[in-house]
Amino acid sequence: EAQVTQNPRYLITVTGKKLTVTCSQNMNHEYMSWYRQDPGLGLRQIYYSMNVEVTDKGDVPEGYKVSRKEKRNFPLILESPSPNQTSLYFCASTPGGGTGSYEQYFGPGTRLTVT
Amino acid sequence: GDSVTQMEGPVTLSEEAFLTINCTYTATGYPSLFWYVQYPGEGLQLLLKATKADDKGSNKGFEATYRKETTSFHLEKGSVQVSDSAVYFCALRDDKIIFGKGTRLHILP
């Protein structure tokens, strides 16, 4: 089944404790991205990657890191999480390098709480 | 830069009512346009899309027409059901992928 998977689905952590949210897709998509969803703010892009070893900042990159060593995986790293990073996070992938008419495929989301 | 503006919610309707959720965009190029739906506790999924002017996307009774002259892509459904309760996002894809802020829809039985 074609899908985007994220782990963990739920995470409660404390300020400053490094964490990684994994994202994997099995559709051989070039483009992957991370979003956070907050009430009243909609979806905001954190980072995106047009292909392996190519990553770029989205609208809200502060406090986050990503890597794209393999085409299928795009982990999101919070080196020192803070309470303002409490949010619902989505990973997404799509064919092509960013342009084109293809839709994005979203993971099920990771709800992160930082205390 | 490119942007997407959609009507703020929440929108509350009775079952079988007619639905319109407005979406307008600004873009320098010729974007593809999308509507995504997010059911409670789930990720976003594509509802419909249109890739060029005057195209109509449709799915599950929902429709939207790509109107270049008014830069709009309004979502419509003739008779909503309780199961349509969700958050709806309008989006465009040009050299970037941009989402609107989402519109929460409540359908009352």
Image: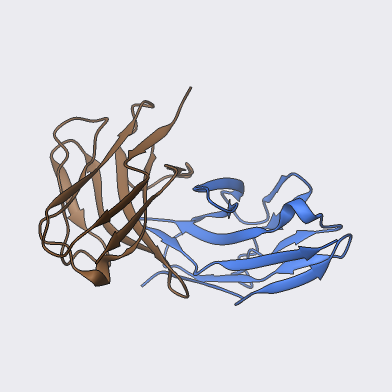
Chain colours: A brown, B blue
Q: Is residue B73 left or right of residue A51?
A: right
Query: What is the residue that sits farthest to the right in this orientation?
Result: B16
- Establish if B92 lies above or below A53: below
Q: Nearer the viewer, residue A74 or B94?
A: A74
In the rendered image, residue B12, in percent from the top left (x then y), is placed at: 75, 72
Which residue shows up at 41% across the image and 48% down it? A109
Q: Is residue B11 left or right of residue B33?
A: right
How many marks do you count on the picture?
Answer: 0
Q: What is the quadrant of the C terminus of chain A in the image?
A: bottom left
In the rendered image, residue A7, in percent from the top left (x then y), is placed at: 31, 39
Q: Nearer the viewer, residue A91 or A81?
A: A81
Q: Is residue B91 left or right of residue A84?
A: right
Q: Quadrant of residue B73?
A: bottom right
Asked if one can make out residue A96 in the rendered structure from this viewpoint, the answer is no
Which residue shows up at 23% across the image and 40% down it? A74
Query: What is the residue that sits farthest to the top in this orientation?
Result: A1
Q: Nearer the viewer, residue B4 or A111?
A: A111
In the rendered image, residue B85, in percent from the top left (x then y), is placed at: 70, 58
Q: Quadrant of residue B106?
A: bottom right
Asked if one can make out residue A109 in the rendered structure from this viewpoint, the answer is yes
Which residue shows up at 86% across the image and 57% down it? B79
In the rendered image, residue B35, in percent from the top left (x then y), is placed at: 59, 55
